[in-house]
Image (cartoon, rainbow, N blue to C red):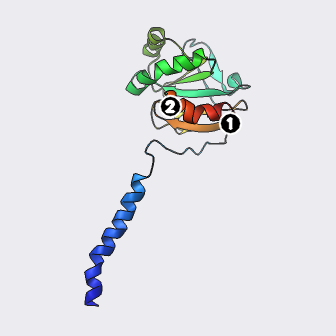
């Protein structure tokens, strides 16, 4: 029995090392979404650029698009924005979701940095973002022509992310 007590620290070390090893193999940017393969939640929100207009799911039906969650308070969104402009220039449909932001600064942002979005939804209180399971900005969802969410990417979309992850799903 006394010999067994000598191995307890070794056993504890091995168990802890196994947990740490497993933790190192997890991608910290991968945050699974419960909405994968489910429709975009129903919404009826103001158009950021035309406050008198409303945007609903029906306005986005019929073609695939990227739903990009962004805000002026988000420094990573500033890094991502030039690449979104490039994608829009290549014909990729991108819908903006201005998340928990003030409308006027957001409009100024789009005026100063160009507007890659086919439409921009204002979600000032963040309820639609909550329905989508948004953790923060930037986040990008790949939505197919039927309005089904096929993928969620948390973080900046750049050339590498587009080519390796989003484009293959978007182009299916």
Residue 150, quarter of the rendered image: top right
* Residue at image location 60% in from the left, 38% down from the top: 151
Residue 172, quarter of the rendered image: top right
| Alpha carbon distance from label 1 to label 2 | 24 Å
Density class for disc 2 (Cα within 10 Å; few <14, some 14-19, many ≥20) is few
- Whether residue 128 is visible here, answered yes or no, is no
Q: Secondary structure at mark 2?
A: helix
Furthest residue to the bottom?
1
> Which residue is nearer to you in this view: 112 or 57?
112
Q: Secondary structure at mark 1?
A: loop
* Residue at image location 49% in from the left, 44% down from the top: 30
* Residue at image location 50% in from the left, 11% down from the top: 114
Q: Is residue 106 above or below residue 64?
A: above
Q: Which residue is mark 2?
A: 160
Indicate the position of residue 54 as horizontal and vertical percent values: 63, 19
Indicate the position of residue 1 as horizontal and vertical percent values: 29, 91
Whichever of labels 1 and 2 marks the residue nearer the N terminus, that label is 1
- Whether residue 13 is visible here, answered yes or no, is yes
Q: Which mark is on residue 11? A: none
> Which residue is nearer to you in this view: 47 or 60?
60
Indicate the position of residue 171 as horizontal and vertical percent values: 67, 30
Indicate the position of residue 10 as horizontal and vertical percent values: 29, 74
Q: Is residue 92 left or right of residue 113?
A: right
Q: Is residue 23 above or below residue 134?
A: below
* Residue at image location 68% in from the left, 36% down from the top: 148
Q: Is residue 6 left or right of residue 59?
A: left
Residue 72, quarter of the rendered image: top left
Q: Is residue 80 above or below residue 113?
A: below
Q: Is residue 166 left or right of residue 38?
A: left
Q: Is residue 91 left or right of residue 12?
A: right
Q: Which mark is on residue 148? A: 1
């Amino acid at each position: 029995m006394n010999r067994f007590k000598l191995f307890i620290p070794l056993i504890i070390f091995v168990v802890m090392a196994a947990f740490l090893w497993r933790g190192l193999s997890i991608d910290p940017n991968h945050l699974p979404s419960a909405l994968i393969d489910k429709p975009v939640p129903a919404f009826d929100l103001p158009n950021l650029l035309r406050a008198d207009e409303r945007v609903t799911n029906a306005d986005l039906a019929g073609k695939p698009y990227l739903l990009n969650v962004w805000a002026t308070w988000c420094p990573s969104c500033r890094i991502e924005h030039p690449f979104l402009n490039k994608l829009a220039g290549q014909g990729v449909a991108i819908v903006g979701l201005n998340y928990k932001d003030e409308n006027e600064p957001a409009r100024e942002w789009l005026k100063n940095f160009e507007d890659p979005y086919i439409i921009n939804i204002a979600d000032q209180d963040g309820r639609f973002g909550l329905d989508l399971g948004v953790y923060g900005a930037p986040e990008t969802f790949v939505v197919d022509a039927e309005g089904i969410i096929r993928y969620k990417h948390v973080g900046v979309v750049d050339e590498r992310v587009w080519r390796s992850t989003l484009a293959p799903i978007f182009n299916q």
